[in-house]
Structures are given as structure tokens and as C-alpha cells.
Image (cartoon, grey):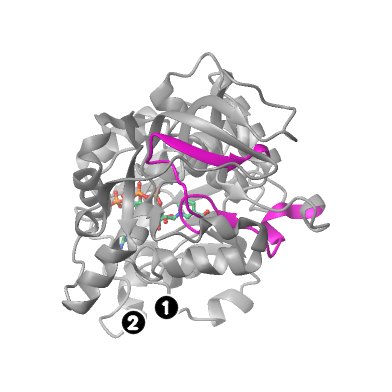
Amino acid sequence: MWAYGIQKSTRLERLEKKLRIELPSQGIELFNSPIPELRPGEVLIETRSSALNFNSVWSSLASPVDPFSLISNHVSRNPQDSDHAKDFAIFGSDASGVVVDCAPDVHKWTKGDEVMIHCNVVDTSDPITQADSMLSNSQSIWGYETNFGAFAQYTKVKQNQLLHKPDQLDWHQAGSVLLTLATAYRMLISSKGAQIKAGDTVLIWGAAGGLGTFAIQLAKMAGARVVAIVSGEDKRAICENLGADIIINRLEDNFKDFTNEDGSPNYLKWKRARQILKKKGVSDIDVVFEHVGRDTLGLSIYLARKGGKIVTCAATSGYLCSIDLRYLWMELKTLIGSHFATYDDANKALELVASGKIKVITDSVNKISTLPEKLDYLYEGRAIGKIAFLH
Ligand code: NDP
């Protein structure tokens, strides 16, 4: 079968030649791979569509962690998944398709079912999963920390990673939504996240991106006022369409350079950011939706109102961040770490899409052969919504 990811031999060759991976397209390749064999509790899917997530940028760059190290770590925590340790790694964490085979102990799914895959791989026999599956030591992200991801003709998943594809969704939409939608849902809505409420003001970084387009809609649905931060006029337009109340073009409005070269806070720029927001009528920010990290986390904490919350799931610009703790403790703010979502969160979030309350914003629907170039496009921050592939 065809597959996109990386072969160990290619990785070793680059390392031996000391070839740096400057762009994600240099760290992904097309290769032939055997169709995965099923173990108990697993289902084989013939994929129909998939979509890019930023984690495939990290996989391709082999940074901050090489995909083979991530998979070997998964296997050491989950010895039952030892067959994931192969001399190749198939990337991708969002896909939809059709069930073509099930392990004998799988009863919920049958051949021909049209399904969507969510990326929370977890051993449900771990008692903590009853409270929050993301807390289990067995937990990994499919197609990032595990092998046999979305970018292949066939993939295998645990039976509890599947959801029925709603008829209302096209294949490309079904293969695009779950990772970022469910992540944004947990961050803003679920009891484990910021639990926004009507009347809150929510500041959303990267508001036209994969997470951001869902975050705007979830916040508006909850009755919040949305302050959307973007970097271009085309991105502003999509945020307007989604109902954002205040939109800041961070490049044109000089809403940038919050962190000095050495990583320390640029307090002058922090004050200026507060002034810019005030001029636009924003004085109290209840919740900041963070995923940028190094360049903005310190500012995000500074900007939240007394008693406000900052919820974060990532660090696109770097994971070593300077924060000024005085603005956290003196002002009684809460910094919430969040990571993907439970099956329940994913299911509830999907219902919002199936019922038409939340729209899937698609940057483009592409042939899978364009995957490497589309990874570079995502890496360069050009995507608006989701980049989808039909297989
Ligand atoms: P996208 O690329 O679609 O959107 C991210 C946006 O962030 C960019 O388009 C850009 O928007 C903005 N951004 C990037 N760098 C900066 C910067 N230095 N300053 C301000 N804004 C910046 O990615 P996603 O929304 O899909 O994902 C975002 C991050 O979240 C990634 O790192 C991803 O790995 C992570 N993630 C984590 C998850 C988890 O479960 N932990 C799940 C999903 C994603 P603009 O230029 O318009 O301002």
C-alpha cells in the first residue's frame, strides 16, 4: 500500500550526511508499506480522506523529538503495541474511511461502516481513563506518537478511536475536523478546560488557523465576545465571517515583538498591546486561548484580567517561555495545560458539526501527492482552516 512518513534508512542517511531538515517537505517521503496486521481490539480502515495537523510538521522536522523515539516511547508504555516499532513511521492524525476488517473481539464495528478516526490512543483498562483518558500513562497521539497514521491507503486503529461519519459531512470534512475541533472544545468548553460562559471576553491567537477557526465558533456559541488575532487581511475576513467581534492584524497593527531575542519579556510591547486592546474597547480579557508559546505566553498571562484564565495546548514558536510570575499570582490567574480531548469531548464536539452549529473551514482539498508541499505551506503559517486530502 502507499504511505507517507519516513523510513528509518532515510533518516539515518540524512543524519550520517549531517543534512539538516530546514523544511518539513524534506523530512517526509512516499514509500510502499505492508498493510497493517490487526491485533485484538483493532480495526482496519481503508482511508478516504485525511488532513494536516501541525504535529506532522514536527514529525517531518524530527523536532523537537524524532518520530522513531516517540513511537519507541509509546511501545515501552504499551508493550501490547510492539508491532508499531517498525523501520518506517507513517504520519497523520486525522482521517476518515471505511471499515474493511475487524479483530475477532471487535463487535461494535462491521465491514462497510463509514467512520472518522480520533487520535486519542489509550488503554481503557487503566482506571484513570474513567476520570480523564488524557491522564493515562498509556495515552498517545495516533499518527504522531504511534505508527500507522492517516497518510496511507490503509490504517489500523483501536476500536475506541472510531466515530460514525455523519451523513452531513463530505469525506474531506470528515477527515479534517476531529483533532483541532476536539482540542479547542476541551480547551474552552469542557469541565477540564476554561469553561467559558456567556459574556466572557476570549482572546484567540492564530484565530484563522486549524484550532482558531473552531475556537472562534465555540466561543461565539457559548455567548462570549471574541478578540481574534491574525496576520493578514484574508485571515481577517474569515474571522469576520465566523463572528469574531474584534480582529487585530498583528503585523499591521504592530501587535508583535513581545519577546526579546534572548527570550526575555519586552515590557514596553506588553504595555502597548494593552493600549491597542483598550483603544478597541477591550479592557478585561477573561480567557486567553494560547498555543503560540515562546513569542506570546508571557503577554497572554499579562493580558488576562485579575482572576482570568490562560488555556494552552502548544508552543508553535518554542516551548521554553519566559513568564513574569507576578502577573499570575498577584492577579490570581489560572494557567491551564490542555492536550487533545477525551472520547466524550470528541463526540460532543462532533455533534456540533453534524448539527450544523459549527462549520468546518477548509483551506483547500488536495491530492495526497501534494502532501509535502502543503506541509511547508502549513509550517509557513499560510493555512486558513484545514488542509484536506482526498485519497
Ligand atoms: P495553524 O498553523 O493552523 O494555526 C496556527 C496559527 O498560529 C498560525 O496560522 C499563526 O496565525 C499563529 N502563530 C504562529 N506563530 C505565531 C507567533 N509567533 N505569534 C503569533 N501567532 C502565531 O496550527 P493549528 O491551529 O492547527 O495548531 C497550532 C498549534 O497547536 C500547533 O503547534 C499544534 O501542534 C498545536 N496543537 C496541539 C494540540 C494538542 O492536543 N496539544 C492539538 C492541536 C494542535 P497568524 O499568523 O494568522 O497570527
The answer, for residue 337, to whether it is visible in the render is: yes
* Labels 2 & 1 near each other (Cβ < 8 A): yes
User: What percent of the width, then of the height, locates residue 298?
Assistant: 44, 73
The answer, for residue 284, to whether it is visible in the render is: no
Residue at coordinates 27% horizontally, 35% vertically from top-left?
368
Residue at coordinates 51% horizontally, 27% vertically from top-left?
358
Residue at coordinates 61% horizontally, 73% vertically from top-left?
331
- Amino acid at the residue labelled 1: Leu
Mark 2 highlights which residue? 263
Mark 1 highlights which residue? 320
User: What percent of the width, then of the height, locates residue 381?
Assistant: 26, 51
- In which of the image's four quarters is ligand 1 placed? bottom left
Report if residue 139 lies within the magenta region: yes
Residue 303, compared with residue 381, is above or below; it is: below
Residue at coordinates 63% horizontally, 53% vertically from top-left?
194
User: What percent of the width, then of the height, locates residue 347?
Assistant: 65, 33
The stretch in magenta equals 131-159
Return the residue nearer the eye: 100 or 20: 100
The quadrant in which the N terminus is found is top left
Report if residue 2 lies within the magenta region: no
Return the residue nearer the eye: 259 or 85: 85
Alpha carbon of mark 2 to alpha carbon of mark 1: how far? Answer: 8 Å
- Asked if disc 2 is less than 8 Å from ligand 1, the answer is no
Residue 326, compared with residue 69, is above or below; it is: below
Disc 2 secondary structure class: loop
Return the residue nearer the eye: 382 or 178: 178
Q: Is residue 143 left or right of residue 334?
A: left
Residue 326 is drawn in which quadrant?
Answer: bottom right
Q: Is residue 106 left or right of residue 157?
A: right
